[in-house]
Amino acid sequence: MMTLTINGRKVELEAPVTILEAAKRNGIDIPTLCHHPALELWGGCRMCLVEVEKMPRLQTACTVRVADGMAVRTETPRVVAARKAILEFLLINHPLECPTCDKAGICALQDLTVRYGAVAGRFEEGKRVFPEVVDDPVIVRNMKRCIMCTRCVRMCDGVQGASAIGVIEKGARSHIEPFSGGRYNCEYCGNCLAVCPVGAIMSKLHRYTYRPWQMEKTVKTICSFCGVGCTLRLEVRDESIKRVSAEFGDGVNNGLLCGRGRFGYEYVDSPERLKTPMIRRDGRLERATWDEALDYAAGRLLEIKKENGGGAIGGIAGGRATNEEIYLFQKLLRAGFGSNNIDSIARLGLLPAQKILEDIFGQGAVANLISGIPRSEAVLVVASDPTRTNPVMGLEVRAAARAGRKVIAIGHIDGLRRHRTRRLEAKTGPGQETMIMAGLLSELLKIKPLSGENPEFEEAIKAWGKTLPGPDEVEKATGVSALLISGTAADLKDVSTSSIIAGRELASSMDIRTNMMMLAALGYILNSRIFLISEHPNEQGLIEMGCSPEMLPGERPVDVRTFREKCEQAWGAGINPEAGLTLMEMIEQAGASIKALYVMGEDPAFGLPSRGRVKEALGRLDFLIVQDIFMTGTAAMADVVFPALAWSEKDGTYTNLEKRIQRLKKAVIKEGIEDWRILAEIGKRAGLPSRYRGVADIFREIAQVSPIHAGLGFESIEEGGVLWPYKGKPLSVSSSPSSAAGRFPGSGKAVSISPPPDRNVLKLVLDKPLLHSGTLSTHSDALMDLTGGPEARLCPETGGKLGIADGDAVKVSTGEGQISLRARLESGLPEDALFISNDFREAGAFELFGYQLEPESKTPVLTVQNLKVERL
Amino acid sequence: MIKYLLGNIDNPNAAEIEEYEKAGGYRALTKALSMEPEDVIGEVRKSGLRGRGGAGFPTGMKWMFAANDPKFPKYVICNADEGEPGTFKDRHILEKNPHVLIEGMAIAVHALKAERGYIYLRGEYPEAEKSLQKAINDAYRKGYLGFPLHIHRGAGAYICGEETALIESLEGKRGQPRLKPPFPVNAGFFGGPTVINNVETLANLPFIMASGADSYLKIGSPECPGNKLFPVSGHVERPGVFELPMGTTLREIIYEHAGGIKNGRALKAVIPGGISAPVLPPDKIDCPMDFVSVQKYGSMLGSGAVMVFAEGTCLVKVAWRALKFFEHESCGKCTPCREGTGWLRSILERIENGQGREGDIELMEDVAGNIAGNTFCPLGDGAASVALNFIRHFRSEFEDHIGTDCRKMAVL
């Protein structure tokens, strides 16, 4: 305990914080420019100088720690004079172009000048001038405005870990430049411009179209580009979003964003947005009124149900729908049309993976806080790259690496390549992570003492572990040295807390069960928080809200009567007791047992592998309803199209990959009807009474039906969201460890691992672009300016062998189909891999991939046959 | 008088290891290696050796702080980034007597149980690099060095002579001073406890170890024992580097050792410790040159670099040139130094060009006053003090210069 005085006021503190922090906690404001709570201490601007008794010089409040008995004065005449002097120094070279600077009104330098009074201009020489740099698609640099606080550099270096910018030259000529020159060669997180206190680094989006004080409203909502669920602020004027920002201290992201979140919002205002409902008449989609479309859709579905039974109708939902919409969607299919054929894109990885882990550890096995990652002693990243798919979670992994934690990358994790990690990379491309993980696990089982917390489970994994391939075997198969594997295991020997991050690469695999069992075993041995990467903002919601053929809301099995009865009572309709068809099964059955499909916020004709076959199947349907915001490939085939609302136009909730329920809030709607109303209206026509006045009412119903959401209301989901286990009851499969052994199925059998792929054969790998998230973000101009278009990435050596140069147009074909796109040669990529993403409409990888269903989880596992790459 | 720093300087082969050995070299190291590291530190503490880089911090105490830090590895860095204008003393050791430095470093590395040593060498000293590297190679060959000793050449930034900026630069980063605390003795090079000593400081160690602290204490002044190198430049008959006991007066240095003012002119001003040290008028030259006394005379010993200005020198021009230096060398980290040094230079420039205005001197005092005490590191203080002290001692010359172009009368 220490006591000091600030401005004569007695202040008591437990631990020595900086003077700035001590003052702040006591409501005393000390001005700062270079200081930022998220960044390394700097002490450069000298704005926060204060007087400390017995110290002859003024001290920087942001760097000096308080000591017992200290007497601090923050606004004495001497301090004020020094601050005025600092402002004068800053202004001698700062252009007074506030009238044309977009920062005016929210500029720290401007505010401080107002606070301490303008000075007479005593500096008569010319100001330092740098030309404005507008070479970059989204970031404008105006270095004559720079005050050299270096917040951007410290952000880029010390938080984002991109190290793309630095201070150039010295003294008064110092300024900030990307190492790449005019255009940035970076991750485009834009966190640099978020911390710029002046107008030196700014977003080019909506430049000169608004003044900050003219914003009509600011709405705090959740980002819709991935499963992290970052808190965003949408600033609105003239019915459109002008700026997306994040406040430090807010949300899971603590003020950080990625490029998609910060610059990807423009699709909302795309002229290509669907505006009116459409009905197919004489083979053509034509505009219709809402009533026409709703009547027609409901009427046709009822007809089909009558003729073929509810089982002939299926529903597919996307991961951007809110919990309320998903809930209503599955309710509509289950209660309105008597069908359990309902599934979602979560089937592609998250749902089956999570399910296996929950079978072992109990519900909530993957509900862990992202903020815990850098606090773990070790972090294992397996196969999937969090810095690409869940960028802000990736930052926590980088933070762990920076803090000296043991970060281990199993597989080619691009985003960690330049960070302090131990890399267990197969000599050649991806697909060998299962083997590497097995080697590490078998070695760990040998050397790491187990906690003894759950002897039965330990016996099970030990027995199972005996059949795992050892490091030598793994070296033979993958080229990862046995020494590196055993060294890594030795390094992990004393670890008592850790995090494991894995994603779709492990789930979308014939080895999914082995992979998840290994994750579980590693998780137990290393006392890990397990995180499953989630590509969509509400993928977790799809699972929890019952958007799967086998589970009702609250993840209750549909074949258990008591759970069914609870829903039947609430919905006033019977529920089919048998689990329905999964995602790919519905497609495969299209035209056969499935006659009609209702697709909400998803584009199966583009977003599922074996695109040719999927399209054919959709064509065989009697009736197809698509609810989407753009005319997608699937929508173009539909019989009825409902225009949906974008994320910024909706109220509701999203559940992120930590199982944190957060509020999505409407910023602005130009036109359209909320998605939940469309579902409710069809429900009404199918005999489901709807008494919802808004999404809060739907949520109230969810809380009644779903035991895990019991007791929750919109009121309770405000700041920071609600964390698992919410207030409700997890599924009563006991999560006590003793029963876990019993749920380590297959532990009696030997481990089965598919043989690693042939190293000499070029492999097609599904790429994840950092700046795109499905085709949705390709409607955002800024992101398109940054990325250009579809690319096939490969390493220069392979390019050389194939006679392909950087930028060449290439044709890639497989047994499934062919696409043409540009080749991009990137050093550091594995030699036997060709990376193509499925995010660009003109050329998506799912044209090339086939699939095979993993028999147990029904996850489509990507397959490739006869891959050929030719220069065009 | 004993000369142990540059005693053998007249021997053209002084830099050769055999010559150095012949003169008794490396015996101090052998002796130190036979002692416990703690005892070596004790001897250095007892000797009262003070750092020759400018601040005069007791070397033994610095070592003790680093030795007491439980962290390993520890490092010893020699600051050979001699950049203070007027200073060229270390260069003579580096080029002419490198083994005395290498022996000193070996003693320090032993005393501190350090893992390795670095010599951060001024980039503009290519000759020094050659002789130093040869000397290091020879010392390895002869088996004197049991630790890695590296030379790192700087890239020309004055600020890298500041110890924390030096560490940043050595780590491969932009040369800018770091926040203190933590001090380098606790968290220096890559976070390890690090002792940074000036070339001349380390070069004092062989004598201290060989002859003992008691003999050392007999040299120089009581509070600042030992010999000091005084590089003398400017309007003197015999400019050069002089090894003299601490406490030798400025008068003796200028008039006896440096041969007096050139062409028998009168002394106008003298800077006693490199450009950052406040200028002194002629009536202060009886000042004994040691850390304590110079301060009493209103300046500082700094690097001991004596810059002599004879009657007829335009001091506005001297001040302008000094500020131009500081403006160029300001790293840009903190506001007052980054923006203020250039402003002061520009005011001096217009006065020098005969375009000074009423109030310019007061403006300069105000701007310099706003820099002084408010900067991140001492560079800004040095710049402000140049402006303030030239005005303080030679105000009338500045006043007379307003509106006059003196360039024709200046005889430099």
Image: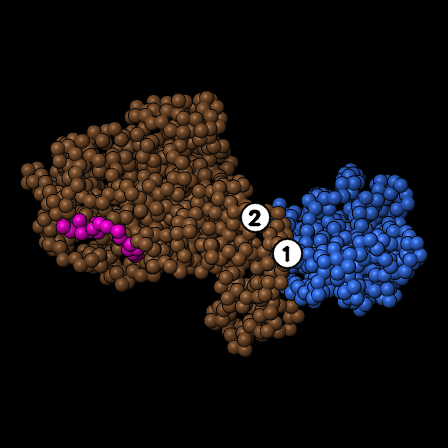
Chain colours: A brown, B blue
Give above or below for A515 relative to B182: above
Q: Which residue is mark 2?
A: A130
Residue A23 rendering spot, x and y as whole percentages: 51, 70
Q: Which residues are magenta?
A: A661-681
Residue A791 rendering spot, x and y as whole percentages: 40, 32
Specify the subunit that label 1 lies on.
Answer: A
Instruction: Estimate how packed mark 1 is, as few (under 14), some (14 to 19) or many (20 or more) residues with alpha carbons within 10 Å.
Output: few
Q: Which residue is mark 1?
A: A125
Identity of the amino acid at label 1?
Glu
In this view of the protein, can residue A593 be seen by the observer? no
| Location of the C terminus of chain A (image quadrant) | top left
Give above or below for A6 relative to B287: below
Give above or below for A803 relative to A73: above
* Marks 1 and 2, the one that precedes in the sequence: 1
Quarter assignment of residue A777 = top left
Specify the subunit that label 2 lies on.
Answer: A
Quarter assignment of residue A76 = bottom right
Identity of the amino acid at label 2?
Phe
Residue B122 rendering spot, x and y as whole percentages: 73, 46
Q: Say the numbered circle drawn on residue A282.
A: none
- The answer to whether the residue labelled 1 contacts the one labelled 2, judged by CB atoms less than 8 Å apart, is no
Q: Is residue A843 left or right of residue A625?
A: right
